[in-house]
Amino acid sequence: MKIPYMDRFPDVPIPLGDQLKRCVDTFGDRRAVSDVHITLTWRQLKSVVDIFAGRLVDLGVKPGDRILVAMERKFDIVPVYLAIACTGAISVPFNFKASADEQVQILELIQPVCGFFHRAILEQNPILHDDFRTLIPDDPEFRVAIQRLQELPEEQIKDLQWPDVKPDDPAYLNMTSGSTGAPKAALATHRVLYGNTRACVEALALDETDVHLPLFAVMSHPHEIFCRALFTGAAIVLLDNLYPRSIAETIQNFHVTCMMTVSPVYKLLMPFLVNKKFDVSSLRLPESGGMTTASSLLSGFQEITGIPIVPVWGSTESMGIAFCSELTGTTPANSVGKCLPGYSARIVDRNNREVADGEVGEMCLRGTGIMAGYWNGREIDSSMLKDGWYHTGDLFERDRKGNFCFRGRLDAMMKVGGIKIYPAEIEAALFSHPFVREAVVIPFDDPDRGIVPLAIIVTEPGESLTDKQLRRFLKFKLGSNKMPKIFRFLPEMPRTSSGKIDRKALSRFGNMAQEPTDESLKRRLEAIDLKILHLLNERLRIENAIRPEIRTSGFHPERIQETIEKLLAFNPGPLHDSLVEELFRKILSLRTLY
């Protein structure tokens, strides 16, 4: 359905720099971007962009040059990306959490001329010191300039001119991995970004009154941090952590209307929304992408908040989301809804023939938001692009109403925290250990973290390994998101009648009983700590619910000793009685208003 707001925006694609100028002309003194430390209006944002763009020009950056970006989710990441786009250069989000080998491969592929890095990231990644120039937005040089800029009257802010950037010029490279795990760079032009953003704005009914809180990883689809707000003139709020209390406070304090993150974050957030601890009534569009959103989470979140989570689906090659569910929460469970405007989808079998509704096949996409190609022509082959259709490798099923349901991966690739992970790469790293005879990596649906890699190992005869030993070995070979979260050790692999490893049979080993690992014990401790915290808060709520006169008589200090003596009678150890007494004296003495 066409919404009237969209009539204000042309179908003709507009480069990022021209969109920024439009926002300055239309919304100059309105809030553009904020974090906990600073707020910039659209006019001030344009001037910060000029500061960063001017430094790039001073360094001799030319249109088409590649610029690395390794920054946290803070306010200055927005003007950095826009400055690179306005100079005609190409930004490349750099995964600073990847392994050293992966980082070397990315640098060899991209050949950057310089980079924007936050100081802490630069210090933690020695490879970023090598052979190219660095710009550090959180250094005093830039911070002082930005502070002075905020103090200037609007009429004294200078407006710099930029090179003429065309819609089909490259804007940025979105890094992903091929079937072997080798890095690839999907190329997004200004036209492609505009096409994807316009589709999102229309499908999600966005406008200039929105306040966006983007919580996706900064190295994955970074344009979704700012493109929607840039299109409409809305405000952006950036938060550099995923702590649920911080998220709830940010929604409340900045009156956030639109939030985008992965489903585990919503699960962590829910306890902070019970009993309206925080006012999140401004929130109208909580998007959930990057992984499947459980039906129990959808119903639980809506029951607590009255707001339906909107599951969405996208990929690196679709340059953001290409499907979204009904905003009213009426889309069937386990569905990602329908195609966004400007995208087309079909489901095909292995012979590239379209299948009927209700049948599972590979989902194919085309449209204005599909990538322009891979940088340097890497890995554009007939298995992925056929007659203009991008073959996603994702298995989907379409129902009779046109809703698409995700059913798995065609090539066993998994998405961990919204980032593509290929088992073959992890298996290759495992095979490099001299004691590993066979290794298979499969996805495991962890109730707290979503999909995580699970490694099943067969060791060489006479050898043994522990998960701790393997993690230490893999630390220098794999990034943290590719590190298996669970290890299972078998005497031999199950096999099919033809002698191949039976991967379907292996899937049951995710829940098999096994000696607890260091990692599983650590998770159990964390769960116990959270339970203790929950029980202490619950005890305090109950105590404060008791009338003051009864509380005084029933919980008088003289009775604390009696209560402790009863507790000690049930103490099985290993906690010593004296420690139990000390802890419970503090607990029983708590007095505060909830």
Image: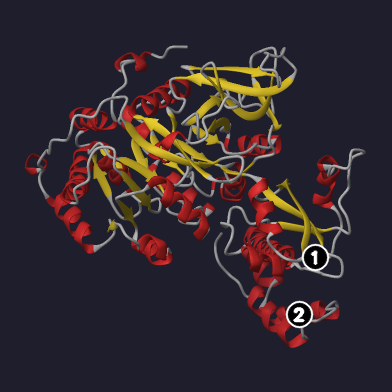
Residue that numbered label 1 is attached to: 516
Where residue 253 is drawn, which disc sits there? none
Q: How many marks?
A: 2
Which is more foreground, mark 1 or mark 2?
1
Residue that numbered label 2 is attached to: 564
Compute the Cα span from label 1 to label 2: 34 Å
Can you tell which quarter of the image residue 574 is in? bottom right
- Badge 2: how crowded within 10 Å, few (<14), some, or many (20+)? some
Q: Position of residue 161 (x, y in %)?
A: 13, 35
Q: From what the image shows, is residue 232 above or below residue 214?
A: above
Q: Are marks 1 and 2 in contact (CB under 8 Å)?
A: no
Q: Is residue 155 left or right of residue 240?
A: left
Question: What quarter of the picture does the C terminus occupy?
Answer: bottom right
Which of marks 2 and 1 precedes in the sequence?
Answer: 1
Q: Identify the residue at the far left of this view.
A: 156
Can you tell which quarter of the image residue 352 is in? top right
Q: Position of residue 46 (x, y in %)?
A: 20, 40
For image coordinates 68% across by 56% down, the residue present is 484
Looking at the image, which is closer to me, 436 or 192?
Answer: 436
Looking at the image, which is closer to me, 492 or 314?
Answer: 492
Q: Amino acid at mark 2?
A: Ile
Question: In this rendering, does residue 208 appear at all?
Answer: no
Element type where label 2 sits in the image: helix
Q: Position of residue 207 (x, y in %)?
A: 36, 26
Can you tell which quarter of the image residue 256 is in? top left
Element type where label 1 sits in the image: loop
Looking at the image, which is closer to me, 253 or 296?
Answer: 296
Q: Is residue 594 left or right of residue 132?
A: right
Q: Amino acid at mark 1?
A: Pro
